[in-house]
Image: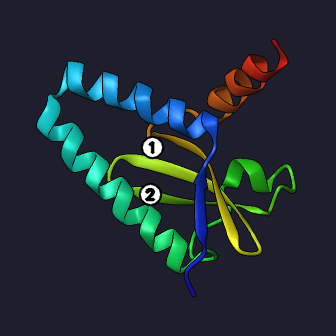
C-alpha cells in the first residue's frame, strides 16, 4: 500500500540547508548521491509507513505518532496519519536532536 508523502515547510528548509552545506563542504556529487538516497528512502516510507522506529527523544515525550529512518548520514523524522505521511525533519544523523527540536520550537514561537 503506497500513501501520499508531504514534505512540510520545515523539512523543505532542512533539505535546502543540507544541500548548501554539502555543496560547499563536500561537493555537488556528494550532494547528488545523498539526495538520491533520501528520495529512495522517502519512497520506501511511502510504501511502508510504519517501517521506521519511534525516535527515542520523542518516545520519552510520548509522541509515538512520529517515526524515523536513517538514509545514509541523514535522519528523516516523519508522522504517519491514515493515507498521508508528513515529513517533518531531514537532518544529519550526527546532530543533537534535542538541540534541533529546541531551535525548531523557538523558530516557530518567534
At mark 2, the secondary structure is strand
Nearer-the-camera pick, 37 or 62: 37
Q: Against 35, is 21 above or below? A: above
Please identify the quarter of the rendering in which residue 48 is found. Answer: bottom right
Instruction: Report the side of 6 relative to 12 (left or right).
Output: right
Q: How far apart in space, not on screen, are marks 1 and 2 (Cα)?
A: 7 Å
Asked if residue 56 shows in the view, the reply is yes
Where is residue 80? Give x, y as percent.
Answer: 71, 66
Question: Badge 2 local density, few (<14 within 10 Å), some, or many (20+)?
Answer: some
Q: Which residue is mark 1?
A: 93
For the point 15% across and 32% down, which residue is it?
28
Please say if the residues under marks 1 and 2 sit with CB atoms less than 8 Å apart: yes
Mark 1 or mark 2: name the one nearer the start of the chain: 2
What residue sits 17% from the left and 28% below the top? 26
In the rendered image of this protein, does residue 59 appear above or below residue 101? Answer: below
Screen quadrant of the C terminus: top right
The residue carrying mark 2 is 70
Q: Residue furthest top?
A: 110
Amino acid at each position: 500500500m503506497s500513501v501520499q508523502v508531504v514534505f512540510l515547510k520545515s523539512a523543505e528548509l532542512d533539505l535546502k540547508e543540507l544541500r548548501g552545506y554539502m555543496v560547499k563542504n563536500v561537493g555537488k556529487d556528494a550532494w547528488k548521491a545523498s539526495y538520491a538516497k533520501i528520495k529512495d528512502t522517502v519512497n520506501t516510507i511511502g510504501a511502508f509507513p510504519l517501517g521506521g522506529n519511534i525516535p527515542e527523544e520523542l518516545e520519552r515525550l510520548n509522541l509515538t505518532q512520529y517515526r524515523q529512518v536513517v538514509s545514509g548520514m541523514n535522519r528523516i523524522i516523519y508522522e504517519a496519519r491514515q493515507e498521508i505521511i508528513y515529513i517533518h525533519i531531514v537532518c544529519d544523523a550526527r546532530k543533537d536532536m534535542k538541540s534541533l527540536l529546541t531551535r525548531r520550537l523557538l523558530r516557530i514561537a518567534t
